[in-house]
Every structure is written in structure tokens, then in C-alpha cells.
Image (cartoon, rainbow, N blue to C red):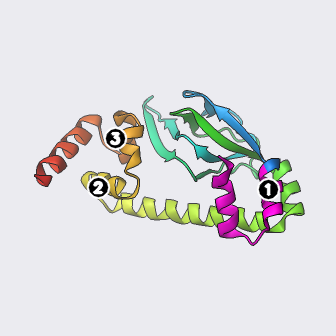
């Protein structure tokens, strides 16, 4: 599993094999069962971050009407940042839960700072990963606003096709901003157009 992390170190740093091995042995890797919560809406989030080695994590919140709204899915090779360094007493506005059994790298600010001091290129790698993540989120948001529900679904099929079979359809529909019934109609229409 740590080969995924090593892949990122090779891609974003010029660390030698020995340094990469030392870092991969120093990071905390944890297994979480399907249904486990990493964070609950309304709790103090603490200062943690995650990197998905295996599995799928859903980010969602309960809106004012009591409805669950899915805002993201994180799968292999994706970071799950929790930015709360400046407002440590602010309650989380969302929950993170494992949709599958997951293996995650778990980080916290203190251990991160120690690692960054020891391996300065590691900080550069994390910064580059976060820049990529932020760019992807901005792109997804712009596409979401400027597209129809059908276009959003087609974009999922193009960029993240594995989600269609990995997540419950009502959660996928919520992520797309539509009802499960609308998603069913879109899927049916797309299937008919292929023939």
C-alpha cells in the first residue's frame, strides 16, 4: 500500500530511496472499516489530514431541512485535507465517513511539522499535492455551475467512472445535485442513446 505514497514522493520530490523509505516507515497508516466516521458534522475537527491508499470516503453535510447532501468522494491517491489550523474552536460543517473498508495515511500538524523540518522536500510535495487538489476542486465547481445534470453525470463517467459502481446511487445523485429518480432517467436516456 505504501507504494502509492512512494509514487507521489518520486513524482514530486528528488528524495533518495533511503529517505523515501524512512518517510514511508514514519507515516501513520490506519485501517478503517466501512461505515467508520473520520469526522462528524458539529464536532471539533482537530488537526488531521488523510491520504487515501485504498477505499472510498464520502464528505457530506446535513442541510437546514435535515437532508443529507454529498459534497465529495475521495478515492485512491487523493488527499482529504481538513483545514482548521486558524479556527481551532470552530465546529465541523461536514462529516467524513468510509463507504468501503479503507486504508489511509493519517497525519497531524505536530508530526507533519517534524517531518517537514527533517525532510524539506516533503513539505514541497504536500504543497504541490494541495495545489493540484485545489485546482481540481475549482475546476469541478466551475463545471458544476455551468452544466446540466446530464452533463455532470457524463463528466463523472469520463473522469471518475469507478464512482458509478462504488457509491450508492442516492449519494451519487446528491453529489450531482439531483434526485435519485432524475439520475435513473439520465442513465436510461444515455443507455438508449448508445444503441
The mark found on residue 103 in the picture is none
Q: Are marks 3 and 2 in contact (CB under 8 Å)?
A: no
The mark found on residue 21 in the picture is 1
Where does the image place residue 144, in percent across and percent down from the top left? 37, 57
Answer whether residue 21 is magenta in the image: yes
Where does the image place residue 49, in percent across and percent down from the top left? 70, 47
Mark 1 is surrounded, within 10 Å at the Cα level, by few (under 14), some (14 to 19) or many (20 or more) other residues, namely: some
Q: Is residue 86 left or right of residue 33?
A: right
Foreground residue, 57 or 103? Answer: 103
The answer to which of marks 1 and 2 sits earlier in the sequence is: 1
Mark 1 vs mark 3, CA separation in Å: 41 Å
Answer whether residue 170 is magenta in the image: no
The answer to which of marks 3 and 2 sits earlier in the sequence is: 2
Q: Which residues are magenta?
A: 1-24
Q: Which residue is mark 3?
A: 173
Foreground residue, 155 or 43? Answer: 155
Disc 1 element? helix
Mark 2 is surrounded, within 10 Å at the Cα level, by few (under 14), some (14 to 19) or many (20 or more) other residues, namely: some
- Give the residue displayed 37% in from the left and 50% down from the top: 161
Q: Quadrant of residue 142?
A: bottom left
Visible in this render: residue 42? no
Mark 3 vs mark 2, CA separation in Å: 13 Å
User: Where 176 sits versus 166, above or below?
Assistant: below
Q: Main secondary structure of the magenta part?
A: helix
Q: Which residue is mark 2?
A: 154
Where does the image place residue 57, in percent across and percent down from the top left? 54, 40
Amino acid at each position: 500500500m505504501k507504494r502509492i505514497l512512494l509514487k507521489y514522493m518520486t513524482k514530486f520530490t528528488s528524495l533518495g530511496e533511503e529517505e523515501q523509505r524512512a518517510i514511508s516507515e514514519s507515516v501513520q497508516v490506519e485501517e478503517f472499516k466501512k461505515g467508520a466516521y473520520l469526522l462528524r458534522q458539529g464536532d471539533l475537527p482537530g488537526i488531521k489530514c488523510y491520504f487515501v491508499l485504498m477505499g472510498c470516503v464520502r464528505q457530506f453535510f446535513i442541510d437546514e431541512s435535515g437532508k443529507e447532501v454529498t459534497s465529495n468522494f475521495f478515492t485512491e491517491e487523493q488527499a482529504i485535507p481538513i483545514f482548521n489550523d486558524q479556527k481551532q474552536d470552530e465546529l465541523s460543517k461536514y462529516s467524513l465517513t468510509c463507504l468501503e473498508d479503507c486504508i489511509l495515511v493519517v497525519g497531524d500538524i505536530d508530526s507533519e511539522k517534524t517531518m517537514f523540518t527533517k525532510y524539506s522536500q516533503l513539505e514541497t510535495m504536500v504543497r504541490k499535492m494541495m495545489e493540484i487538489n485545489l485546482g481540481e476542486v475549482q475546476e469541478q465547481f466551475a463545471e458544476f455551475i455551468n452544466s446540466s445534470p446530464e452533463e455532470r453525470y457524463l463528466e463523472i463517467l469520463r473522469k471518475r467512472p469507478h464512482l458509478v459502481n462504488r457509491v450508492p446511487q442516492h449519494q451519487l445523485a446528491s453529489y450531482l445535485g439531483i434526485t435519485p429518480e432524475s439520475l435513473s432517467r439520465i442513465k436510461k436516456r444515455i443507455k438508449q442513446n448508445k444503441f
